[in-house]
């Protein structure tokens, strides 16, 4: 091995050893706000009730989906075999309602779902959620 090759190899080795991007270095994590933090920020003094509403709506399941069909002229949860007939779908933790049968990808993320929740809450209040209107959320208080 030539001196020039040795110097190049040593230079590469030192870059690897002293690099801030070493493979064994701890990855940098940017912590996303928790569900509770989002709820507190959006709902403020109504966050306890809002937490119960969202627990009832989805069990805090980020991937929750609920299809809505019309039976006898009324909108109800679709039977599994009727999902292809759904006129709308409820998406994510807050079960945000969307026309059609597919949840937009942004509603299946915590930050995307909560951004939509904030808009809904500002215009409709807690009455936007069926579990609030019916009182079904109260079992989670």
Image: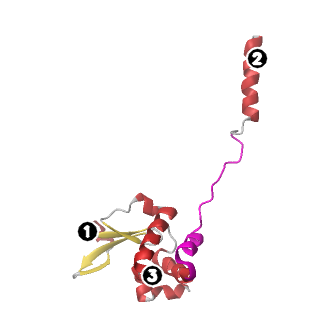
Which quadrant is home to the C terminus? bottom right
Q: Is residue 28 magenta?
A: yes
- Dot 1: within a 10 Å radius of its alpha carbon, few (fewer than 14), some, or many (20 or more) residues? some
Location of residue 37 by image quarter: bottom right
User: Viewed as shown, does residue 88 lie left or right of 137?
Assistant: left
Q: Is residue 9 above or below residue 100?
A: above
Mark 3 or 2, closer to the camera: 3
Location of residue 11 by image quarter: top right
- Label 2 belongs to which residue? 6
- Label 3 belongs to which residue? 126
Specify how the rendered protein is coloured: secondary structure
Mark 1 or 3, closer to the camera: 3
Q: Secondary structure at mark 2?
A: helix
Q: Secondary structure at mark 1?
A: helix
Mark 1 or 2, closer to the camera: 2
Q: Is residue 88 above or below residue 9?
A: below
- Dot 3: within a 10 Å radius of its alpha carbon, few (fewer than 14), some, or many (20 or more) residues? some
- Label 1 belongs to which residue? 85
- CA gap between label 1 and label 2 equals 69 Å
Residue 17 coordinates in the image, percent (x, y):
76, 33
Q: Residue at x 51, y 77 (%)?
A: 55
Q: Is the residue under label 2 in contact with that under label 1 (CB below 8 Å)?
A: no
The label on residue 55 is: none
Mark 2 or mark 1, which is nearer the start of the sequence? 2
Mark 2 or mark 3, which is nearer the start of the sequence? 2
Residue numbers of the magenta segment:
23-45
């Amino acid at each position: 091995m030539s001196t020039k090759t040795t110097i190049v190899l040593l230079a590469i080795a030192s870059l690897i050893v002293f690099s801030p991007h070493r493979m064994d270095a701890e990855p940098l994590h940017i912590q996303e706000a928790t569900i509770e933090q989002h709820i507190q920020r959006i709902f403020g003094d109504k966050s306890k009730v809002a937490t119960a509403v969202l627990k009832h709506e989805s069990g805090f399941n980020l991937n929750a989906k609920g299809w809505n069909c019309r039976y006898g002229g009324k909108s109800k949860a679709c039977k599994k075999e009727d999902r292809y007939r759904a006129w709308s779908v409820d998406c994510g933790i807050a079960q945000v309602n969307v026309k059609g049968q597919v949840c937009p990808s942004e509603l299946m993320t915590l930050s995307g779902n909560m951004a939509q929740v904030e808009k809904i809450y500002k215009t409709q209040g807690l009455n936007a959620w069926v579990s609030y209107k019916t009182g079904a959320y109260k079992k989670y208080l």
